[in-house]
Amino acid sequence: MKRGKLQTWGLYAALLVIAFVMISPVYILFKVSISEPEEVNTAHPSFLVQDATMDHWTDILTTEKKTETGLIIYGIKGDTYSVTGADGNDYTLKGSDQFTINGVFKKVTFLNQDKEIKLGREELQNLRNNLTTKKTFFGKKVVENLYQPLGKSFLVATITTIVAIVICAPAAYVISRMPSYIGYIVVLGLLVTRMFPDVGIALPVATRFLSWGLTDSSFGLILAHLIPNLPFLAWILVGTFAMIPKDLEQSAMIDGANRIKALIRVVFPIAIPGIAVGSIFVWLNSWNEFIYARYLSTEVATLPLRIFEVITRGSIFPAAAYSMILTIPVIIITFVLQRYMKSGMLSGAVKG
Amino acid sequence: MSSETAVNRQTNTKSSAKWKKLKSFFKMYKLETFMILPLIVYMFYFTLTPIINTVTMSFKDDDTGAWTLGNYQEIFTNINFTSALFNTLFITIVGIVLQIGFALIIALLLNQEFKGKGFFRTLMLVPMGVPTLVSGVTLLFIFGQTGYFNELLFRLGVVDTQPFWLGGGIDTLFVIIFADMWKVLPLTVLLLLAGLQSISKDVYEASSIDGASSWQTFWSITLPLLKPSITMAVILRAIDSFRIFELPLVMAGKSAPVLSTFSYEAFRHSNYGISGAAATILLGIIVLFIIAYLFIVERKNLKEVK
């Protein structure tokens, strides 16, 4: 059916609107991550970037924090707000001085000793409303390392995906070739195991891992991430394999291939689009995963955990920058793998 | 004594016959057994036993370990729990209706042939790459009181003041629904798109030869053939939506509790029984929905496969 010109324009208009809604939150995130604090911390934030700054990025990419005058302040001593700079000198701050921690303005009175600084939403709002200075001082609690949580997140997501494919692809194939009634029951079983809320499973798993010494370990987190992802991937792949006709592998076997060869050479290659889609979901699930990580990690954070720590502290700018770092590889992966997300090659295989 | 051994022998031969049957079954399906076993073992040990643990935990007193219904009595008199229950149901039901509708529209658009299809498709996938937690953070920037949504309304002249969307109540729930929808639309679209693409082109060719209008084609060909994908998407989304956790946690905190966050808060305060009870109720609701689904949708399929 040929489309009219008007319909084509309508199609593009609809697509543009949808694309705008899909993209704009990511743009806002990016915008916040490169904005001067006063451009965002105001009653009327600007939509376009007016004054781009890489400060927030440099702050998290380098673990050292610099003040506006180039001083690195490591420690804050007691109620006198005496701070030690990188040059070794001590500086005294007044209680009414304002400072920023990663872009969020706070009064120095919040900097009592080494206490962790937490701000409620209203406090934050108050501080934003009377910001006056651009002075930037950092307590040593704020100094964070990006690379450790980044590495952990990447490792866990990748290994979880690989293990999930290795376990699920063969199992899903078997399920898809079961007598339809039994296969149906098994698929329903997969569905039921995927139903249970993570908060319910994570609790007993957390106590189990504690006694095994798996808390904070990547291995433990991989085991945990497989819990929701195995039935998920298996379920998706059963659908994929079920669409591959049995005649295909049988004709391969008639042509002289044995069972395993027929599977590896004929069946699995056809299933690759389905496996690709499924494993992208698994990778993203694991990369985004927060609940198990929260239950199973005490010291060694994943990137989502780190972002949660930062945002609950009210530091929106590094949260935005961290979030961008978390988002970039996923966009690249999605872009690279999307051409495999076609199930069209299946019909070609049957016809040929 | 001797009769006993005879009985034993009899059962032994009986069971060994069964065993033989089982053995020959496994011999016949050696490869299949080997392929499916890891999945079954893993799910048994890391899903089934924790589920049982949690359910038993909900019926036990934290301190004494004695069987009790006290945890359930406690949460049903807790106002936070009842509002968590309402919020969860509201977010799920309203959210899914909106999500499936929008996802179907987008999938149908993307299933057409047009220039720049790959580009648009990639753009659609972008939210999938944003961690749920981060989408909460981002939408916090947007729906916060001095956020970009209020600024947009202000510039369009819709509002003079800045409404606070995240203070609890229905508007907060709608913001959470929007956040959830934004995050998961790509996934739902992909599921529906895969379903659309699995529909053979021949069917469409036949219908266009028969002179069917595009609306007729959609209504009597696309939609029925897409039904399995839609039901799959609905269940997947319902499950995830009931378990919604990060978005309410980040965006609304305690002003809009849901069952998961309620359970998590209880866990954080070491009230394992309470946490287990909330999780068990959450499970119960989901099971109810699944049973309804089985009766409404799957009963026909079950008869067919039988």
Image (cartoon, coloured by chain):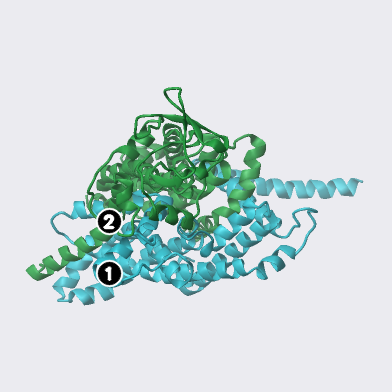
Chain colours: A green, B cyan
Seen in the picture, residue B102 relative to A211 is either above or below; the reply is: below
Q: Mark 2 belongs to which subunit? A: A
Task: Tell me if label 1 and label 2 are in contact, CB under 8 Å.
Answer: no
Lateral position of residue A194 relative to residue A346, left or right: right
Answer whether residue A254 is visible to the viewer in this image.
Answer: no
Q: Which residue is mark 1?
A: B222
User: Front-most of A170 and A124?
Assistant: A124
Q: Position of residue B158 (x, y in %)?
A: 28, 73
The residues bearing labels 1 and 2 have C-alpha atoms spaced at a distance of: 31 Å
Answer whether residue B42 is visible to the viewer in this image.
Answer: yes
Residue located 46% across and 64% down the image: B238
Lateral position of residue B18 relative to residue A264, left or right: right
Q: Amino acid at mark 1?
A: Thr
Pointer 1 and pointer 2 on the same chain:
no
Residue located 24% across and 58% down the image: A19
Q: Amino acid at mark 2?
A: Ser
Residue B106 sits in which quadrant? bottom left
Lateral position of residue B30 relative to residue A30, left or right: right
User: Front-most of B155 and A237?
Assistant: B155
Residue located 74% across and 64% down the image: B70
Q: Residues within 10 Å of mark 2 (few under 14, many from 20)?
A: few
**Numbered circle sitting on residue A24:** 2
Determine the secondary structure under disc 2. helix
Instruction: Please identify the residue farthest to the left as the structure is shown.
Output: A5
Q: Position of residue A250 (x, y in %)?
A: 35, 46
